[in-house]
Amino acid sequence: MQASKFSVFTGVLSDPDAREIAPKPTASAGHMNNAYCRIILTLTTVMRLEVAKRFEQVGSVLVHDLQRILEMDAGYGHSTPFSQTVSQDKLFAIESKMAIIILCMNEKPNVIDDLFAGIPHGCTIIFVSNSSRGEHGGVDNYRIEVSLLKNFCRLTGRQAIAIHQKDPATAEAFEAAGAPDLIDPSTAIPTIRNGKGEGMLMGMTLAAMQGCEYLGFIDADNYIPGSAFEYCKSFASGLHLAQSADAMVRISWGSKPKYRDNEWVFERRGRCSEVVNGWLNRLLEEIYRETGNDSTYTNIIETGNAGEHAMTMALATKMEMAGGFAVEPYEYIFLLEQMGKSGDAKAAAASLVHIHQHMTRNPHLHDNKGTGHVGDMQSQGLNVIYHSPLTPEGMKKDLLEEMIEKGLLQQGETPRKERVYPAIKDLDLRKLDRVFENAKRLQISTQQPQRKTWL
């Protein structure tokens, strides 16, 4: 009898309405109603975010002010005038349709294994690696990574895809699909170019083919699994609250710890972020001046280099992606160039792009990649700002001077023009899939989801 009554309560429960759907106490089931209430309190975990204080709109693009994560578990809490809550069933509704794309290059196996544990169960994992394959007698790191992922999926009943950036069949597939610029011409056997943006585009395309409605990015060099878990919950919360077909959630880390002078220093912003954010905001100011807006100062953009970010698939399929480390700043540039100027107010309102920025609480801890890595990130991010048609000549002159002053360029040099790849909507996914199916050597491993879709 008890088992049959508890079977009524299986499934996902909605937090705001949980009290309304609870059964009325009866003489035979009164003791079970108390147990039911305890189950609700356990299952209806709520995430609480600060309400964005303001937003700035450029054409069809709305950039929302930074929102803090107020509570990672707000219990049975409700929204207030100053905060918004998202219940567990709403989070799961997003997560169950979301791919988390993990980008990896020769990270420590235990760090990768821990990271898998931080990805919510409802999400599909897409693992994009550019790790060593045992060249010149070295260690085949990718083989170790796939083994870890397979074992994780076996133990947890998860779904995942693993793919290597240097797999020749992958290059063949993307060239056939209409992205020949992705192919590295310097290799004897065609492969995808090195670069973060290139790996992201691979992961996005696989997510689109699997029919995912949302996708998020997390770097594999993350020493704190709890931060990855918080990022995913933040993604789901922001995408649910956006209530928009074209929405993006970008993470600003709560802190980035550095060990300095025998103590941990929890810095709020990274060296690269401060520079790139400053110039992206300067670009917004220039756009405002051109349109006659009196408000010419802004600091609204705080996530120019956000490696951890998510978006709706509807938006992702429209996005042209830059190569290398230019990829994250270029997302802002692309949206401002394509949707930042709209003469038709009605059309703009119908196709608004919402960019939400969340400040998470977990510190983001990873290996020190060195000053060269930071310099590459800065220069590639600034390159796409410099070459944007939105950037006026006066700003270009100032930007060039700063890049020379920081040692990112030599006197007389000009910023390199970064590669930009076509949007997913412009690729032939059917051709891509046919090559994948025919290539027996293709490194797609583990419990691959069966759903497929073509745009």
Image (tube, grey):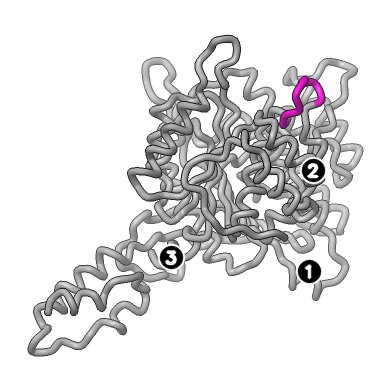
How crowded is the residue under tag 1: few (<14 C-alpha within 10 Å), some, or many (20+)?
some
How crowded is the residue under tag 3: few (<14 C-alpha within 10 Å), some, or many (20+)?
many
Instruction: Reply above or below: 200 against 188.
Output: below
Q: Residue at position x 20%, y 88% from top?
A: 24
Instruction: Reply above or below: 216 against 129.
Output: below
Q: Which residues are magenta?
A: 185-192
How crowded is the residue under tag 2: few (<14 C-alpha within 10 Å), some, or many (20+)?
some
Amino acid carrying mark 3 in the image = Val
Residue 188 shown in magenta: yes
Q: Position of residue 53 (x, y in %)?
A: 56, 61
Picture quadrant of residue 203 = top right
- Asked if the residue under mark 3 is in contact with the one under mark 2, i.e. CB atoms within 8 Å, the reply is no
Labelled disc at residue 348: 1
Q: Position of residue 178 (x, y in %)?
A: 82, 45
Quadrant in which the N terminus appears: bottom left
Q: Which residue is mark 2?
A: 176
Residue nearest the observer in this picture, 99 or 296: 99
Q: From the viewer's perspective, is 177 left or right of 355?
A: right
- Ranked by sequence position, the earlier of labels 2 and 1 is 2
Q: Residue at position x 73%, y 49% from top?
A: 297
Picture quadrant of residue 328 = top right
Q: CA distance from mark 2 to mark 3?
A: 42 Å
Q: Position of residue 370 (x, y in %)?
A: 57, 18
Q: Position of residue 211 (x, y in %)?
A: 60, 59
Amino acid carrying mark 1 in the image = Ala
**What kind of element bears circle 1?**
helix
Q: CA distance from mark 2 to mark 1?
A: 35 Å
Q: Which residue is mark 3?
A: 86
Mark 2 or mark 3, which is nearer to you?
2
Residue nearest the observer in this picture, 133 or 362: 133
